[in-house]
Image (tube, coloured by chain):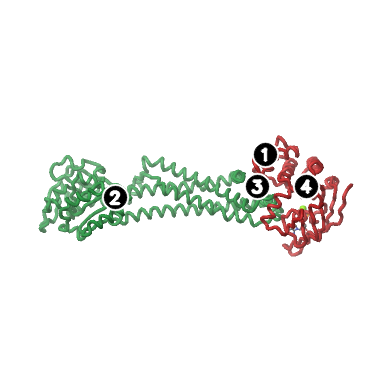
Chain colours: A red, B green
Amino acid sequence: MNIIEITHLHKTYNESEVKVHAVNGVNLNFEAGEFAAIVGPSGSGKTTLLNLLGGLDSPNDGKILIDKTDLSELKSSDLIKFRMKNIGFVFQSYNLIPVLTAQENVEFIMHLQNRSKQEREERSMELLRAVGLDGRENSRPNKLSGGQQQRVAVARALASKPKFVLADEPTANLDSKSTEQLLSIMEELNRKENITFIFSTHDQRVVNKARRVITLEDGKVISDERKR
Amino acid sequence: MITAVAWRNIWRSPLRSGIIIAAISVGMSAGMFTTTFTKGWMNQRLEVGVETEASHIRIQQPAFGENYDLKEYIPNSNLLTKEIAKTKNVNGVSPRLVIQSMIASAETGTGVKIIGIDPDKEKTVTNLYTKLSEGKYFEGVKRNPILIGAKLAKKLKVKMHSKVVITVQDASGNITGGAFRICGIYDITSGIYEGLNVFVRSSDLARLAGLKKNVSHEILVHLVNPEELDRETLLLKASYKNLKVENWKESMPELGYINEIGNLYTYIFVIIILLALGFGIVNTMMMVILERVKELGMLMAIGMSKARIFNMLMLETVMLTFTGGFTGILIGLGATYATMEKGIDLSNYAQGFEELGYSPHVYPVVEVKTLIVIVILVIITGIVASIYPARKALQYNPAEALRTE
Ligand SMILES: Nc1ncnc2c1ncn2[C@@H]1O[C@H](COP(=O)(O)OP(=O)(O)O)[C@@H](O)[C@H]1O
Ligand SMILES: [Mg+2]
């Protein structure tokens, strides 16, 4: 059962003199529970593809169905709600809210969803435990290492129980030890909780952990391999 | 939580926020204090003008007018006085004789308005009897006592118990004079008034001018509740159609205008301050938003609606403004309370004002109405200044915002 169906997706940027075809006719499906890496050299269109998939930007052509919902048919305010409910985001530069503690960062989305205080506290603690940060819940981002911040970001992405998590180069700013830690946490969440992760990377060690590797070049999928 | 984020965001750059908050509080404390100071000044002038000089309502013969025509008196004014005194909301009525005359000391002479009063009745319409800097209110001098202003005393070079001579044209057109002895000197910081008005007993003046006992040139009426001024004036006008009934706003319109203009000026002053501060606030918030584009992109991405982002930024601006604004108002009020007892003495800088009846010793006062207006102005500034930056933040698309560094 596919949770994501991408057909004939195109995105061009016309801002500069030269027209850039950043995503050029992509067709892809994702199933629930996947642990997929999107790889490719810098400029190959990974970020653009993930942004389209996350509803942060709109394509020039093609269609994205998420659980039968066509993203292009949502009004912008509905799209925001849709993102909040269905999609978790992890960014390369962590992007936590600097004035909130680790726990408050995780609670933030639940607050936007008007969840009860008790539910917020319980779930945020549970998630921080899952990413190995119990004890650091009251630290603000500037008191955490890059790896710890990215783990808070993963906990935050999961707070609203999304259908899948999109992570654009989540390890690009991390040292190898933090990279390993983060990936094993993501793998474990994927295996135990059946959480779908789609992440981009150009780090071979990260690619090796993925169960599916989609390679992009000049906005086109040039290979799509599943392991085992 | 959004409130907490907005508040903590203010303190992300403590120096920048501190500077703008300090600027707002300095501006607002100046605005606030200027307001209470001006209000105090205006009130003092009004108090003297109404409670000492004019009382609330004045009744005269229409033809008495500007020429103070001796024969244009109100006959049987005692009866009228009694009648008006019975009216509800009237707490004092005093008949007066008013004659243009010359006053002369051993040294020099000048033209004055000589006002004949019943000292006890006069106490119920003006507070002149409380304004004596020397001597006693019609006491201590048996024959022909006279009360003169401090300015006039200086001009005539006379002291307590000095003799002065008053010359008037009597009812039959003859010039007659009478000697009076100074029983008291009043000081009301209104130079012009002090120089031109002297008070004697109406019985003494009537004898000198050859007027009957039971007449007066004007009747002053003092109300229990000054708020009822306009209504009571209309009632008296209706009751005494053949007489000229005027309240102080009509007889001294400049006094009322000055008060209104004073209010207007202080509001304009505060608005100008707030306008300048408003631009500073907008500028600060625009910087804040430029710095946080990426964070705004993240908030949009994870599902914070535009309305909520708008509210959060608005809240931040409003809290920034209120923190500075209310601190400033409190400082201004503090300065007011610190000086309202002893007052502020400007006599070294502002002699000219005294001539116009503005005391050089100012006691600031806090008026609830003006305070409310200023608070509302601060609130409006906060809200207006917050709209533009917050709107600006919404123009980004999340993908673009996230790409920025
Ligand atoms: N906002 C933009 N305006 C113009 N060109 C863009 C923009 N964003 C990306 N591009 C171009 O689109 C192509 C794909 O970029 P991107 O999706 O960021 O690739 P990757 O994430 O694989 O490095 C690149 O050539 C990049 O220069
Ligand atoms: Mg990229």
The residue closer to the viewer here, B311 or A201, is B311
Q: Residue at x 39, y 41 (%)?
A: B339
Amino acid at dot 2: Val
Amino acid at dot 3: Leu
Displayed-image quarter of ligand 1: bottom right
Amino acid at dot 4: Ala
* Position of residue A34 measured from the top left corner of the image (x, y, whole percent): 82, 48
| Earlier residue among tags 1 and 3 | 3
* Position of residue A53 measured from the top left corner of the image (x, y, whole percent): 76, 54
Q: CA distance from mark 3 to mark 2?
A: 61 Å
Left or right of B296: which side holds B373?
A: left
Q: Residue at x 32, y 54 (%)?
A: B255
Q: Dot 3 corresponds to which residue?
A: A112
Q: Which callout, 1 or 2, points to the residue nearer the camera?
A: 1
Q: Dot 1 corresponds to which residue?
A: A121
Task: Please tell me whether residue A175 is drawn above or below residue B230 in the rendered image.
Answer: above
Q: Residue furthest right?
A: A228
Q: Residue at x 73, y 59 (%)?
A: A72
* Element type where label 1 sits in the image: helix
Q: Which numbered dot is residue B50?
A: 2
Q: Is mark 3 within 8 Å of ligand 2?
A: no
Q: Dot 4 corresponds to which residue?
A: A172
Circle 4: is it few (<14), some (14-19), or many (20+) Cα within 10 Å? some
| Earlier residue among tags 4 and 1 | 1
The residue closer to the viewer here, B68 or B305, is B305
